[in-house]
């Protein structure tokens, strides 16, 4: 009977396991297949440098970096007119000279890959982007909201897209006044000649697609479009923060493309995900019109505006970010010397922070405080070179 | 019991022969002859020529019979027995050498023994006996209990001619429950009807003497001899066919396939349903409905069914007249209906009666039993995951009965016992409760009260908890105005809600709720002016109140902003009339018209979009605000219903039907996640109602004395303005859902072939369906296109579908069932690649529904062991041992993709990926 009960129980358990489900990887052939479609990321700049990045799509289960498409020939073509070449400055990054395009003409991008395959984008009008009226900010409840406002007196723009690059000053969590000298294998004080590894700047660029439209308004006005929200506790707001907003005017078609791309986010598998979107860009293969090509090459001028926000402008009562890191005290064990301790800092991944002095006083250190490089050297996450625009 | 009944009959016949045998013996003529493919008429003529026998038969009834026989000096009875072997013809020979050939039931050539005795001696119908001879008063309702007695109906007049109406109720003699769908007819001339959902029948017959026959599923076939003088009533009690193991399928209406006017309708008796093996040993009506041709589901364990290319929201699921929005438990692993309280399930796929409306594709009408009016009874079942108990009995004998049923799982407790942490944190549970009271106020007025409540809870791991609940109540008052007219007034309330709570990540902890309320009031009338016409008419009105979504934070740390979509409210009304006209015995038509109205009402603010532009947030021109009760959108239109039947021969017919349906409520289902969150949306100023037309043509033929049914039905269906989502639509918590959906057009066509053997040791059905369902989204006005405006397969386009349901009976107590199902995998949109654009990773999707998931197939096996068949014992019990998915095929339940550490991985989740053995104990007392 005991035996029987146990068997029954195991059957029940088995059923429940099945109820809870059996999940196995699913990768149909088509997903495994070599789906390396061309991705064209860039736009034609009406009054400046046009930058286009070519890459390839990769299988969804691949972890490597996207394949760069190098050695291609790119031309910016005016409808029945001039051609302007793009040059590959960095691998797969193609850049034109600074151009001033004719706003009454249409332009397209011509691509010839190193394999000889040819692609073109549709001819598009060069939209005149009106200047950014202002970039403003507001301290909300425990967050900083950044807005962009724009206005086109000619009522020609209506559809807008923004990108931004933001930069902020920050420090390493721990200030170190000593360093390990690789040449002598000893700990020495940091001097004037040493690089500043405490004060740094870090930059980031927008990841979300920011779109706005005045189509429903009687005037072509964008008033305080919220472009970014920063939490009070974020590192960005600790010292000083700067944001450079770039504004692009879009055609309606381009707007719809970006809108679809915006909704098609990285998030997948959760309850609130949008349903799959099909994207139809405006780049086509000349040989095979059915070949999927990803990207929409629009044309417009670019307008930029930068603002700064310092800590002292922000509410005093906010709780701000403060970096913390763990430090270890290194004291010589029996028979060890300070020099033996210093060797532990060899290589640079573990760094000395300060010397430890005897508690009862004395001028000779008895050990060191040490921490990982990440805690001490701010350059691990940014640069200690002050940007030229920094005020 | 049938067996017993038959034995008694044959004994009676034998007795007749014994009684007259002596007299006959002397003059008995022996027959000799050689017949090859002779018609019965030729045969009869030959016999009449050889002997003094005279044959009486219906020439049209025997025309399918052919006689191939070699006899030499044999008595007529032996010869006839050979002739009628394997047919349902019966013969009887009386004392004056008249031979009566009948179909189904043998003609009794002698009067019952007690015929001339005082009526009081027929024990069963004792109280009514006095009335039997009472004439006149139309009030007098006879309760006919004897098959042999002659019941006189109406005011006795000599030489009366013309026609008179006969009506009454059919009831189960044991429980007093009404008998639905029983055929009530006389054979010569053939006039018949079927009892409706209240067991009510109404027939207009020529005045005179008739043999009224009654056939019903699972009940003994019976007949009453009547003498009809004028309009009157006759209630008939029918005994249950106790040995139900034998007659499992729709025996009573075995020629209904061919002779009924209705096409595209499947009626399942609970007994049929109980034979089909299921995953957890629990009888599941939806699972059986899914095995019928033309009915598909998106996947295993999915909540909905797709009928002839319709989406899951296009089925009107009525449980005792109340609309059920989610007919399943645990995401479709169990159906929401407790099998013990069910009586019948009817599915209309085409030729939908005018009485029903509001959904495009089908009507699934689930009817519960009435409760035993005679004595207290109970039934139940104990399974591995669920148990159920039903109690029923009279409150006032023969007048008022109750039925109460409950069902629950104990899977939670078992999950806790499992040694795996993620299972410990999971929970799954449901329960449902049904209550039913029927009260007969008097012969003309009956009240029915139904209540239903179901609740579900499901949690995977410690993260998302999913709950939903159905509530329904209905009150029906049936009033018989006169024999030929009765009406039913029904008031219904239905409610469905769900909520999804997540609390794993305190910052994102949220609670999402959705709810819909529906209140109906409807009046339906049935009028039987003559035996050739059946007229139905009525009106209905539904008030909807929808809470489309509320999102609230679910923990103190949660940063989710409270969000509430504005409520929706609307009234849907309809009036209808239909007439079924039996023009000749072979040709009948039914014409109907339903006109429906829909008014969307405030309070609500409604976005107006720039005309001619795609509806997006950017094209909102202004927002109009409507006060409570203000009507801001109105739709209305006719719905045509037409069906016709042409009998080709006695056992074959052709049927045609056309129907138009309008639907004002739409369901949008987010299918990208593991757990679907459905949003029901009412039509409004920006969302038009769906309209669907269906044309169906079918050929039906019965073989081997109606024991084998064969049918082929083809259909073509067009649907307009059903909602499909645009690319990257957001369906959950969307304040302007019209910007994310678009009215698509769809077409569906297919052929369904079905072969069904209803009786015998081996019974069941085989069906094959070829069908396509295609959708096109190409809005010229707004430029919204999917797949370049080409037709693409819908989510449930599964062209090939094969089903075998079979039952083999070894003995009266042991039977086995085998199921096999195969279907093409459903279409899916796949993420084909990923790429980086605009500093962020994106996914490249294929064309919509361009690929298919693996094909689905499954084999199930069940063994039913019945207890002994003594009628009188404490409890009847049975055991069901079953193995679901015998081959362990891992059919996909859900296919989803998840971003994990920079990779996007695809997963296939199969719920029943291994053979699942179950054991269930059922009892009845």
Image (cartoon, coloured by chain):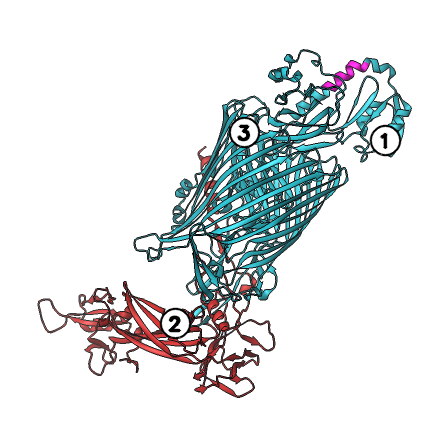
- Judging by colour alone, the chain drawn in cyan in this rendered image is B
Residue A339 image offset from top left, x and y in percent: 20, 74
Q: Which residue is mark 3?
A: B446
For residue B385, above or below residue A129 = above
The image quarter containing residue A226 is bottom left
Q: Which residues are magenta?
A: B11-21
Q: Are marks 1 and 3 on the same chain?
A: yes
SS at circle 1: helix
Q: Between residue A153 and residue A109, name the one nearer to us.
A: A153
Chain letter, colour red: A
Badge 1 crowding class, 10 Å Cα cut-off, few under 14, some 14 to 19, many 20 or more, is some
Q: Is residue B16 above or below residue B555?
A: above
**In this view, B403 is above or below B549:** above
- Image x and y of residue B388, in percent: 48, 34
Q: Are marks 2 and 3 on the same chain?
A: no
Give the residue number, with chain letter if any, for mark 2. A222
Residues at marks 2 and 3 touching, judged by CB atoms closer than 8 Å: no
Residue nearer the viewer, B255 or B493: B493
- Asked which quadrant contains residue B782, the reply is bottom right
Q: How many circles with numbers are drawn on the protein?
A: 3
Q: Which residue is mark 1?
A: B41
x, y percent for residue B576:
60, 43
Q: CA distance from mark 1 to mark 3?
A: 50 Å
Q: Position of residue B426 (x, y in %)?
A: 41, 47
Query: Is residue B193 within the magenta segment?
Result: no
């Amino acid at each position: 009977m005991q035996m029987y009960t146990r068997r029954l129980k195991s059957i029940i358990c088995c059923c429940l396991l099945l109820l809870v489900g059996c999940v196995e990887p699913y990768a149909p052939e088509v997903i495994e297949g070599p789906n390396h479609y061309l991705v064209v990321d860039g736009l034609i700049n009406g009054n400046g440098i046009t930058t286009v990045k070519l890459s390839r799509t990769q299988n969804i289960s691949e972890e490597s970096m996207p394949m760069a498409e190098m050695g291609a020939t790119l031309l910016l073509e005016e409808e029945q007119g001039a051609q302007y070449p793009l040059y590959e400055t960095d691998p797969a990054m193609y850049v034109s000279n600074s151009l001033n395009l004719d706003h009454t003409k249409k332009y397209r991008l011509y691509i010839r890959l190193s394999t000889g395959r040819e692609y073109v984008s549709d001819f598009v009008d060069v939209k005149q982007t009106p200047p950014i009226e202002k970039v403003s900010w507001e301290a909300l409840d425990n967050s900083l909201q950044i807005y962009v406002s724009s206005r086109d007196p000619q009522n020609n723009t209506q559809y807008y897209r923004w990108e931004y690059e933001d930069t902020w000053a920050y420090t390493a969590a721990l200030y170190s006044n000593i360093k390990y000298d690789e040449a002598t294998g000893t700990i020495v004080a940091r001097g004037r000649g040493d690089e500043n590894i405490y004060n740094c700047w870090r930059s980031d660029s927008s990841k979300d697609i920011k779109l706005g439209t005045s189509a429903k308004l009687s005037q072509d006005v964008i008033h305080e479009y919220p472009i970014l929200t920063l939490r009070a506790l974020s590192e960005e707001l600790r010292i000083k923060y700067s944001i450079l907003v770039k504004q692009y005017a879009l055609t309606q078609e381009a707007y719809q493309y970006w809108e679809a791309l915006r909704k098609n986010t990285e998030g997948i598998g959760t309850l609130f995900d949008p349903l799959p979107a099909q994207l139809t860009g405006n780049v086509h293969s000349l040989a095979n019109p059915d070949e999927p090509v990803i990207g929409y090459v629009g044309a417009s001028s670019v307008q930029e505006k930068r603002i700064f926000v310092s800590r002292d402008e922000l509410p005093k009562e906010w709780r701000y970010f403060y970096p913390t890191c763990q430090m270890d005290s290194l004291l010589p064990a029996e028979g060890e010397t300070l020099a033996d301790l210093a060797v532990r800092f060899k290589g640079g991944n573990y760094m000395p922070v300060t010397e430890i002095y005897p508690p009862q006083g004395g001028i000779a250190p008895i050990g060191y405080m040490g921490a990982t490089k990440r805690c001490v050297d701010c350059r691990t996450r940014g640069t200690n070179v002050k940007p030229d625009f920094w005020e | 019991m049938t067996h017993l009944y038959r034995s008694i009959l044959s004994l009676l016949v034998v007795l007749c022969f014994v009684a007259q045998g002596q007299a006959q013996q002397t003059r008995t003529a022996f027959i000799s002859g050689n017949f090859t493919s002779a018609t019965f008429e030729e045969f009869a003529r030959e016999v009449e020529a050889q002997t003094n026998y005279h044959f009486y038969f219906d020439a049209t009834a025997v025309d399918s019979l052919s006689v191939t026989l070699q006899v030499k000096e044999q008595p007529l009875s032996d010869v006839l027995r050979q002739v009628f072997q394997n047919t349902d013809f019966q013969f009887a020979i009386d004392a004056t050498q008249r031979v009566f050939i009948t179909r189904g039931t043998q003609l009794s050539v002698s009067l019952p023994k007690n015929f001339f005795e005082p009526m009081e001696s027929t024990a069963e119908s004792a109280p009514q006996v006095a009335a039997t001879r009472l004439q006149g008063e139309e009030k007098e309702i006879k309760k006919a209990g004897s098959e042999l007695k002659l019941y006189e109906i109406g005011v006795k007049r000599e030489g009366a001619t013309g026609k008179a109406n006969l009506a009454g109720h059919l009831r189960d003699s044991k429980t007093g429950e009404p008998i639905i769908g029983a055929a009530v007819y006389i054979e010569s001339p053939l006039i018949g009807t079927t009892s409706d959902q209240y067991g009510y029948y109404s027939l207009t017959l020529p005045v005179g003497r008739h043999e009224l026959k009654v056939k019903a599923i699972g009940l003994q076939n019976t007949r009453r001899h009547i003498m009809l003088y004028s309009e009157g009533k006759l209630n008939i009690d029918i005994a249950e066919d106790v040995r139900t193991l034998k007659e499992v399928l729709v025996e009573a209406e075995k020629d209904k396939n061919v002779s009924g006017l209705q096409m595209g309708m499947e009626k399942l008796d609970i007994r049929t349903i109980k034979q089909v093996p299921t995953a957890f040993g629990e009888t599941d009506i939806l699972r059986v409905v899914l095995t019928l041709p033309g009915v598909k589901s998106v996947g295993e364990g999915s909540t909905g069914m797709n009928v002839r290319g319709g989406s899951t929201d296009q089925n009107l699921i009525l449980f005792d007249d109340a609309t059920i929005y989610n007919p399943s438990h645990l995401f479709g692993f169990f159906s929401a209906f407790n099998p013990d309280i069910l009586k019948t399930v009817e599915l209309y796929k085409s030729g939908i009666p005018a009485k029903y409306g509001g959904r495009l594709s089908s009507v699934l009408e689930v009817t519960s039993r009435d409760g035993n009016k005679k004595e207290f009874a109970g039934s139940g079942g104990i399974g591995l995951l669920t148990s159920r108990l039903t109690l029923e009995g009279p409150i006032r004998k023969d007048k008022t009965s109750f039925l109460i049923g409950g069902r629950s799982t104990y899977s939670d407790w078992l999950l806790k016992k499992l040694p795996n942490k993620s299972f410990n944190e999971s929970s799954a549970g449901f329960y449902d409760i049904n209550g039913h009271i029927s009260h007969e106020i008097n012969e003309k007025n009956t009240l029915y009260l139904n209540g239903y409540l179901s609740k579900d809870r499901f949690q995977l791991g410690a993260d998302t908890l999913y709950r939903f609940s159905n509530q329904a109540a209905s009150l029906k008052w049936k009033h018989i105005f006169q024999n030929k007219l009765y009406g039913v007034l029904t008031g219904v309330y239905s409610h469905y809600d769900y909520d999804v709570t997540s609390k794993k990540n305190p910052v994102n902890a949220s609670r999402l709720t959705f709810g819909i309320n529906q209140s109906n009031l409807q009046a339906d009338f049935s009028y039987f002016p003559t035996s050739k016409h059946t007229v139905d008419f009525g009106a209905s009105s539904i008030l909807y109140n929808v809470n489309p979504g509320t999102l609230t934070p679910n923990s103190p740390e949660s940063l989710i902003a409270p969000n509430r979509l504005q409520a929706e409210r609307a009234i849907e009304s309809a009036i209808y009339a239909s007439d079924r006209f039996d023009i000749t015995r072979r040709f009948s038509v039914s014409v109907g018209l339903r006109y429906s109205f829909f008014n969307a009402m405030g309070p609500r603010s409604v976005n107006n979009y720039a005309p001619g532009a795609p509806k997006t947030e950017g094209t909102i021109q202004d927002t109009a605000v409507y006060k409570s009760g203000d009507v801001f959108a109105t739709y209305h239109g006719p719905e045509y219903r037409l069906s016709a039947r042409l009998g080709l021969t006695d056992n074959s017919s052709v049927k045609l039907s056309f129907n138009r349906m309008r639907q004002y409520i739409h369901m949008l289902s987010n299918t990208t996640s593991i757990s679907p969150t459905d949003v029901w949306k009412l039509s409004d100023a920006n969302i038009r109602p769906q309209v669907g037309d269906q044309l169906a043509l079918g050929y039906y033929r019965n073989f081997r004395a109606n024991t084998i049914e064969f049918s082929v039905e083809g259909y073509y269906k067009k649907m307009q303005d059903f909602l499909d989502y645009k690319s990257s639509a957001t369906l959950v918590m969307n304040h302007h859902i019209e910007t994310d959906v678009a009215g698509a057009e769809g077409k569906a066509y297919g052929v369904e072939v079905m072969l069904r053997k209803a009786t015998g040791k081996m019974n069941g059905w085989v069906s094959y369906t070829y069908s396509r369902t295609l959708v096109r989204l190409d809005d010229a006005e707004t430029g919204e296109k999917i797949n370049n405006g080409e037709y693409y397969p819908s989510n449930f386009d599964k062209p090939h579908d094969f089903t075998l349901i079979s039952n083999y009976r070894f003995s009266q107590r042991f039977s086995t069932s085998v199921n096999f199902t195969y279907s093409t995998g459903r279409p899916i949109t796949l993420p084909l690649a990923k790429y980086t654009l605009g500093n962020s990773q994106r996914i490249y999707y294929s064309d919509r529904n361009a690929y298919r998931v693996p094909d689905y197939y499954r084999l199930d096996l069940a063994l039913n062991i019945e207890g002994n068949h003594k009628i009188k014992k404490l409890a009847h019990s049975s055991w069901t041992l079953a193995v679901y998915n015998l081959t362990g095929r891992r059919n996909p339940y859900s296919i989803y993709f998840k971003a994990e550490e920079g990779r996007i991985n695809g997963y296939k989740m199969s719920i029943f990926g291994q053979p699942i053995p179950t054991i269930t104990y059922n009892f009845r007392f």
